[in-house]
Amino acid sequence: MEANKGDSSIPHQYAEVIINEHKEQKLTASRNLENIRWYEETMTFDTFHEAYEWISSDAFNKIGYDYEGYKTTDPKLAYELLFQLVRAKTLETDSREVYADVEFSKNSITYMVWVSRE
């Protein structure tokens, strides 16, 4: 069966470049991922509710203390953790900078969320 060339469900590669003239040094420093203590999550979940419960009871309480970064192949976990960290910063209960990125490999996509060291 021939694929529909106009089918929007076919994945396309996407890249985005952000240029910020005023924070160039800070962005470069935040991207030094070699010195970050990472937790590599192996769990995956079917729903955002399950991801929320998992993140709220585990990763959210450990990031910045037991480790600075969190890697997962489940986008729901990354999104939930990122939301919780940005929300904490917005409510001024946490002052650390929050970062996120994606690593693409041949067989998987790894979502990364990390915080600055205070």
Image (tube, rainbow, N blue to C red):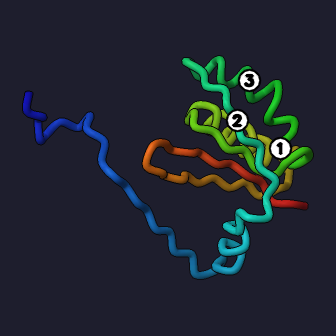
Residue sitting at x 63%, y 39%: 72
Q: Position of residue 8 (x, y in %)?
A: 23, 38
What is the CA distance from the residue labelled 1 to the residue labelled 2? 12 Å
- Nearer-N-terminus badge (2/3): 2
Q: Hey, what amino acid is under mark 1?
A: Ile
- Nearer-N-terminus badge (3/1): 3
Left or right relative to 103: residue 92: right
Residue closest to the eye, 21 or 75: 75
Q: Hey, what amino acid is under mark 2?
A: Glu
Residue closest to the eye, 84 or 93: 84
Q: Position of residue 18 (x, y in %)?
A: 50, 69
SS type, badge 3:
helix
- For disc 1, the marked residue is 63
Q: Hey, what amino acid is under mark 3?
A: Trp
Judged by depth in the image, the label closer to the viewer, 1 or 2, is: 2
- For disc 2, the marked residue is 41
- For disc 3, the marked residue is 54
Question: Which picture quadrant has residue 50?
Answer: top right
Q: Position of residue 71 (x, y in %)?
A: 67, 44
Query: Badge 1, how many Cα within 10 Å: few under 14, some, many 20+?
Result: many
Residue sitting at x 37%, y 55%: 14
SS type, badge 2:
loop
What is the CA distance from the residue labelled 3 to the residue labelled 1? 13 Å
Residue sitting at x 43%, y 62%: 16
Left or right relative to 63: residue 3: left
Residue closest to the eye, 34 or 9: 34
Q: CB of mark 3 within 8 Å of CB of mark 1?
A: no
- Figure check: 3 above or below 70: above
Q: CB of mark 1 within 8 Å of CB of mark 2?
A: no
What is the CA distance from the residue labelled 2 to the residue labelled 3? 11 Å
